[in-house]
Image: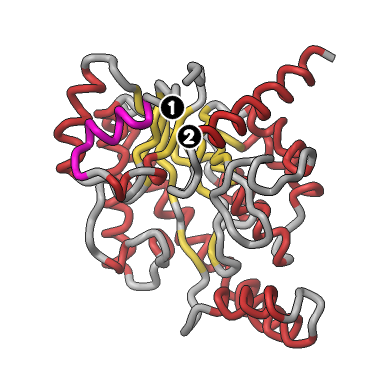
């Protein structure tokens, strides 16, 4: 397939299909990508055959996704309190794992580590219940509004204390990276569950507090779309304010509340994704993060639509 230039492609698309890292990289290269994002399911065993490809210039790593490489500990998986843990020992361990990811990023020549910084914890997955109500009764139903208000009250009440812990953790990791001389950005990612952090406003506050540290926003477009639909924030109103903070983007589309699909192709909407093209163009690292069900021809078509629209906008 045609060369995809500066655009990168996440291994979330095919990591579950390959026990051998080299095979995983070859499949991504066959799509026309020279750059990859190594996601949190990539193992040290995968890396044994990926690292020689990096060293020989056969593939380049744009970014890695914390926790990297994979660890089988649910306390520190992608949906946990992570850098905001109340338990100080767990929070320190989370910082150590982020530093470990940054070390691997430096070793792989990656420009950034994508980080899920944390959440306001609930006793159960209130987000799953809200999404069920959204699909079955609608966002304007009394049941949805009541549960949303309950979620939002706790999120807004406890959010500042978790933001503070996340800031402290990011500062510690940044200071360690500076001492080691690593030129690796930390991108705090917009999330797919309403109790997870950060919102766009929270990301801006964290980045403002840590000015001078290599901490930025990683704008996951599909997740941001989902959170907007559920009512957590408004991308149209807030995106311009956070654009200067964006280091990288995850490119995918969210029909209804189902994410990681090919933009334009799977929604069938020829214009709805256009509002995100400016953020994609500006981002220093541009990564497609697509699910395994996305076919190579759809991936290529989506890329041609995105780059064609960006080019047409520049030509005007």
* Scheme by which the image is coloured: secondary structure
- In the picture, measured across the screen, residue 52 lies left or right of residue 298, that is left
- In the picture, measured across the screen, residue 133 lies left or right of residue 105, that is right
The image position of residue 72, as x and y in percent, is 22, 61
The image position of residue 37, as x and y in percent, is 39, 35
Q: Residue furthest top?
A: 315
Question: Which image quadrant for residue 75?
Answer: bottom left
Please determine whether, in this image, residue 120 is positioned above or below residue 25. Answer: below
- Say which residue appears at 22% left-offset and 18% top-offset: 55
Q: Is residue 24 magenta?
A: yes
Separation of residues labelled 1 and 2 (CA atoms): 7 Å
Which stretch appears magenta?
19-29
Mark nearer the N terminus (1 vs 2): 1
Answer yes or no: is residue 184 visible.
no
Please determine whether, in this image, residue 212 is positioned above or below residue 17. Answer: above
- Which one is nearer the viewer's eye here, 105 or 302? 302
Residue 31's disc is 1
Secondary structure state at the residue bearing disc 1: loop
Answer yes or no: is residue 304 visible.
yes
The quadrant the C terminus occupies is top right
Secondary structure state at the residue bearing disc 2: helix
Question: Which image quadrant for residue 218?
Answer: top right
Residue behind mark 2: 296
The answer to whether mark 1 and mark 2 are in CB contact below 8 A is: yes
């Amino acid at each position: 397939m045609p060369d995809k230039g500066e655009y990168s492609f996440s291994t979330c698309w095919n990591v579950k299909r390959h026990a051998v890292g080299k095979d995983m990289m070859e499949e991504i290269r066959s799509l026309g990508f020279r750059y990859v994002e190594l996601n949190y399911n990539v193992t040290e065993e995968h890396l044994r055959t990926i690292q020689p490809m990096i060293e020989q210039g056969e593939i380049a790593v744009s970014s890695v996704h914390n926790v990297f490489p994979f660890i089988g500990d649910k306390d520190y998986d992608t949906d946990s309190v992570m850098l905001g843990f109340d338990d100080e020992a767990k929070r320190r361990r989370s910082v150590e794992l982020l530093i470990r990811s940054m070390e691997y990023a430096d070793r792989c020549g990656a420009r950034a580590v994508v980080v899920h910084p944390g959440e306001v914890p609930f006793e159960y997955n209130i987000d799953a219940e809200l999404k069920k109500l959204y699909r079955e009764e609608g966002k304007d139903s009394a049941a949805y509004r009541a549960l949303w208000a309950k979620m939002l009250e706790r999120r807004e009440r406890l959010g500042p204390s978790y933001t503070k812990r996340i800031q402290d953790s990011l500062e510690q990791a940044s200071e360690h990276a500076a001492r080691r001389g690593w030129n690796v950005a930390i991108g705090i990612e917009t999330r797919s569950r309403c109790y997870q952090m950060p919102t766009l406003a929270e990301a801006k506050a964290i980045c403002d507090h840590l000015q001078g540290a290599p901490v930025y926003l990683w704008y996951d477009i599909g997740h941001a779309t989902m959170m907007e639909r559920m009512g957590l924030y408004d991308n149209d109103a807030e995106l311009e304010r956070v654009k200067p903070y964006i280091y990288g983007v995850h490119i995918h589309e969210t029909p209804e509340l189902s994410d990681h699909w090919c933009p334009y192709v799977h929604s069938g909407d020829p214009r709805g994704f256009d509002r995100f093209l400016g953020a994609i163009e500006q981002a220093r690292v541009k990564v497609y993060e697509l699910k395994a069900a996305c076919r190579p021809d759809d991936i290529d078509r989506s890329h041609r639509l995105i780059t064609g629209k960006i080019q047409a906008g520049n030509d005007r």
